[in-house]
Image (cartoon, rainbow, N blue to C red):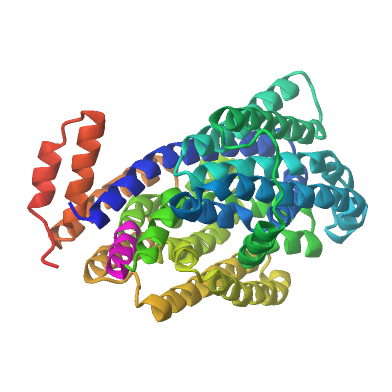
Amino acid sequence: MDETGKALQKVARGMGIVLAGTVISMLLTFLSRAIIARHFDRYQYGSFTLTLTVLSIAVTISLLGLQSGLPREISRNLKGKREEVPALITTGLLMAVTASLIMTAVTLYMAPHIAPLLNDRYLGETLRLAAPALPFMVMTALLVAVSRGYGRVRENLYYRNVLPPLLFLIILVTGLLTGAGFTFVFLAYVLSQVLSSALLVRESLSLGFLPRRPILDWRIARELFLFSLPLMLTGILDYVMGWTDSLMLGYYFDPDTVGLYNGAAPIARLLPLFLNSMGFLYMPIATAFFTNGDIDGLRKLYRTTTRWVFILTFPVFLFVFAFPESAINLFFGSKYTDAATALRILSAGFMFHVMMGLNGMSLIAVGEPRANMTGNIFASAANVALNVLLILVYGIEGAAVATSVSYVTANLYRTWWLHRKTGIHPFGRNYIKVLAPGLGLTVAMTAMGVRDNLLTAIPVTVAGYLVYLATILGLRTVEVEDIELLDAIESKTGVKLGPVKRLLSRFLSDE
């Protein structure tokens, strides 16, 4: 087995763990949001969404891009300058925690000024209640980034994916059952973040990731800051792309409209689930390929992961795009189904993001983080301009168009720049044979006008996906790496996959 095959197996094994954690996290988060959406009115749910949006922007600024820059630098130093790793870790943590304390103070001060801008009578109070969670969220994100630099996924699974949303759900439900009001939601959120962060600090100390005595190295701080600054700006622009719609709906309308829109937006954001899970271990491995000058290995890694991600994501997209009312009703209830058209538009934009693969992480791996930032600048400018032009005319559908266009813009730029830098792009012949039937089936099922309710939506989606799988097998899109992956799963789990491997072997690509 060549190095690319081994790398793909490692990514896939990591993806399995990260995917499990991400699925659990999303389900717990969805459950919490659904409880809040159903227990309180749409205005209050919109206010909750706006509060977390502002808080998330503050967290992104506080992280200084270190959640992406730190794992890359740890991975590099472990190979050549291992003695610098403790200083690297504690310097990065001190930088981010200091920034988070400053942003907490800024958020507390600005809360009463932000509330009238977004026409939200609750926001002044809820932001002040939620702001103390900020340093703990930053600490958790950075310690998970440290473990990622060591090639570990356990900390991400337990302390970021599972524990915070689980604790929030438990505390939230307990409070609501005892008659707690709307403001308790934010106290529950803060407490869940504090407990999760404290447990992760304890775990990191026991694993030896955190030195007992902090080391602040100004040279390392400068290097980290210069490398991570574009990543921070990219992260801020990601939030502009992802959350300007909610903020501007609050500005032009009110939290009730924001609440309606967020009956659709969280569902569309489920689509990059497999993409994000695959990416957790992708970047350190892609960096190793590039550092060793193995561009062909990097190309193979990028194309194969992109193909896997599309195939895994497609049934979710098919269900959401063809049956948007069923998807909304399943999670948030009938009072949010007016957002069905917005969900269809958003799902198209997020699926395009999935189709283009891990282009952003590939750019970081090849030392081009500024290209991500540039692409996000174009996309964010388009997002803001289109929101201004479309929201007053088309409401939540206009906001959905603005967000989708911004994701398309960012991904086109990133893919173009990656190809310009390395000659790599995702569109191999096998991938085209995977894409075309899927997109064709989506158009056909939507045009058929099948009744949009769960009793028909689920079986029709399952049948459509089976037809799709049969089609891509018939087009011979299976590659050697797919069989090698099944070998690795078989040896690791003990599950006998011989019949599956023999079946796939009959449809190996000629490429």
**Seen in the image, is 369 located left or right of residue 95?**
left
Q: Quadrant of residue 332?
A: top right
Membership of 300 in magenta stretch? yes
- Choose top left, top right, bottom left or bottom right for residue 135: top right
As displayed, is residue 231 above or below residue 36? below
Question: For the magenta stretch, what is the residue range?
Answer: 294-305
| Residue at the spot 53% in from the left edge and 35% down from the top edge | 155
Coordinates of residue 178 in the picture (x, y in percent): 76, 18
At x 26%, y 50%, the residue is 6
Decide if residue 264 is in sight here.
no
Residue 321, above or below 462 = below
Name above or below for residue 301 compared with residue 463.
Answer: below
The answer to whether residue 503 shows anywhere in this view is yes
Name which residue lies at 20% across and 59% down: 472
Q: Residue at x 20, y 55 (%)?
A: 2
Query: Eyeballing the image, is 398 above or below 47?
Result: below
Membership of 177 in magenta stretch: no
- In depth, the one of 367 and 50 nearer the eye is 367
Front residue (pair 334, 374): 374
> On the rendered structure, is 375 left or right of 442?
right
Q: Main secondary structure of the magenta part?
A: helix
* Image location (x, y in percent) of residue 13: 34, 41
Residue 289 drawn at (x, y percent): 35, 62
Nearest to the observer: residue 287 or residue 267: 287
